[in-house]
Image (cartoon, rainbow, N blue to C red):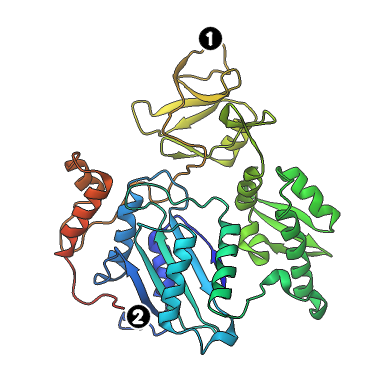
């Protein structure tokens, strides 16, 4: 058994993928390649829109979290095809969620039938029913440990994965691709490497180069290519873990923070942030910020729509300015917003949830605003109770 984590920002896009929307029949009914085998706190009868809305309700309680939609595929060895029943798959997925601390949140578990090995997809909100974020910290190692223990507990075959592929048995381009994977994976697992230059240098020593893919007309890095022996592969063709953004995030986790500040590292360098007050930063803004420059942020939520953000080393925190502090005679207006942590990221679903089916256009954020006396959990329970009376006929059933 192996788990593959690919969290994202779009609940609707993820639901469309796991329910194979692109393969719907001409009459609009779903194809036979999938089946929902388990769910919790999700309304299935309204189809994809209601499932998406169920996740969005939770996501709306913390819209600044990057990749608020959890998506994990659980893949079993082909030799266990006759052993892994639907009931066992649900049971294993439940224990997997417990060990990954995925709880108190809406989810669906979808089995797919399009491969020669058993597998299913878990889709859930990373904002739980209390408005708290389900951590993805160290999820690679936690996922690996959970899959290993469950494989042993149920007496299943171990899916060896790419890192155990015998490269000597491969030929041509496929052999080069796996050589690149092994080299990048070795550097990835080296916890002493905490910046991209060192990451790149160690890969070069292994015979693997890196080329940057830039946004057209700018210097903003959008992706990576890995090169070896005259061949070039996009990061996704090697492994989705090895994208530019994932590598930077992974390397930052290897660096110790300053004992007096979560906004800077022990070596004095600045912790990168990628958003502020609902505005997602460009790559140029991020690069300017971590080099100590003030960055202009337009379209902020709150009293001031345009502010300047700059890390102030004397106090070891970022501060907000009404005008550019890098220019003469500028004064600070306030400290950095205390509600924003350096791990929080903007959501592609900034404004919350879908409307309730059946003609009611009120959203969960609006409902919650009308009931300030309720805790997030109480408001969510009341909202779900309200929606139970608005189910549509048809939809998806287990």
Q: Report the front residue among 368 and 21.
A: 368
Q: Earlier in the sequence, mark 2 or mark 1?
A: 2
In the displayed orientation, state which residue is furthest to the top. 329
Most extreme residue toward the bottom, as rendered?
Answer: 82
Callout 2 environment at 10 Å: few (<14), some (14 to 19), or many (20+)? Answer: some
- The mark total stands at 2
Residue at left 34%, top 83%? 26
The quarter of the rendered structure image containing the N terminus is bottom right
* 274 on left or right of 391: right
Which residue was labeled with disc 1? 329
C-alpha separation, residue under disc 2 versus residue under disc 1: 64 Å
Q: Is mark 2 on a helix, strand or loop?
A: loop
Residue 168 at x, y percent in the picture:
83, 77
Residue at 66% of width from left, 40% of height from top? 255
Residue occupying the point 42% across, 27% down: 306
Mark 2 or mark 1: which is in front? 2
What numbered label is drawn on residue 30? 2
In the image, residue 137 sits, relative to residue 339, either above or below, namely below
Choose top left, top right, bottom left or bottom right for residue 97. bottom left
Q: Which of 118 and 19 is in front in this view?
A: 118
Q: From this viewpoint, is residue 115 visible?
A: yes
- Residue 132: % across, % down: 38, 47
Quarter of the figure that contains the C terminus: bottom left
Indicate left or right for 115 with 337 as reference.
right
Out of 88 and 4, give the one closest to the viewer. Answer: 88
Q: Position of residue 85 (x, y in %)?
A: 45, 85
Q: Which residue is drawn at 62% across and 26% down?
A: 292
């Amino acid at each position: 058994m192996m788990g593959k984590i690919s969290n994202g920002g779009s609940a609707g896009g993820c639901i469309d993928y796991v329910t194979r929307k692109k393969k719907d029949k001409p009459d609009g009914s779903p194809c036979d390649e999938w089946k929902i085998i388990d769910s919790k706190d999700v309304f299935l009868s309204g189809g994809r829109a209601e499932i998406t809305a169920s996740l969005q309700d939770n996501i709306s309680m913390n819209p600044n979290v990057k990749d608020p939609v959890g998506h994990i595929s659980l893949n079993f060895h082909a030799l266990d095809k006759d052993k892994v029943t639907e009931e066992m798959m649900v049971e294993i997925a439940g224990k997997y969620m417990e060990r990954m601390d995925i709880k108190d949140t809406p989810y669906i578990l979808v089995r797919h039938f399009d491969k020669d090995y058993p597998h299913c997809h878990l889709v859930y909100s990373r904002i739980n029913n209390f408005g708290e974020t389900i951590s993805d910290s160290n999820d690679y190692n936690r996922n690996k440990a959970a899959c290993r223990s469950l494989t042993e507990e149920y007496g299943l075959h171990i899916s060896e994965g790419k890192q155990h592929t015998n490269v000597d048995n491969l030929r041509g381009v496929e052999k080069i691709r796996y050589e690149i994977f092994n080299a990048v994976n070795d550097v990835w697992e080296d916890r002493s490497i905490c910046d991209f230059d060192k990451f790149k240098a160690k890969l070069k020593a292994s015979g693997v180069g890196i080329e940057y893919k830039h946004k057209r007309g700018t210097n903003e890095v959008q992706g990576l290519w890995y090169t070896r022996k005259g061949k070039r592969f996009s990061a996704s063709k090697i492994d989705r873990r090895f994208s530019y953004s994932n590598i930077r995030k992974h390397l930052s986790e290897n660096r110790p923070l300053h004992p007096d500040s979560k906004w800077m590292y022990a070596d004095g360098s600045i912790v990168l942030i990628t958003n502020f007050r609902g505005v997602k930063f460009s790559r140029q803004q991020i690069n300017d910020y971590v080099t100590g420059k003030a960055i202009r942020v337009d379209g902020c939520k709150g009293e001031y729509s345009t502010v300047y953000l700059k890390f102030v080393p004397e106090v070891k925190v970022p501060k907000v300015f009404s005008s550019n502090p890098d220019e003469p005679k500028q004064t600070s207006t306030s400290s950095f917003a205390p509600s924003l942590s350096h791990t929080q990221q903007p959501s592609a679903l900034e404004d919350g949830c879908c409307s309730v089916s059946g003609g009611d256009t009120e959203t969960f954020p609006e409902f919650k605003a009308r009931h300030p006396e309720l805790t997030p959990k109480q408001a969510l329970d009341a909202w779900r109770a309200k929606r139970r009376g608005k189910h549509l006929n048809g939809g998806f059933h287990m």
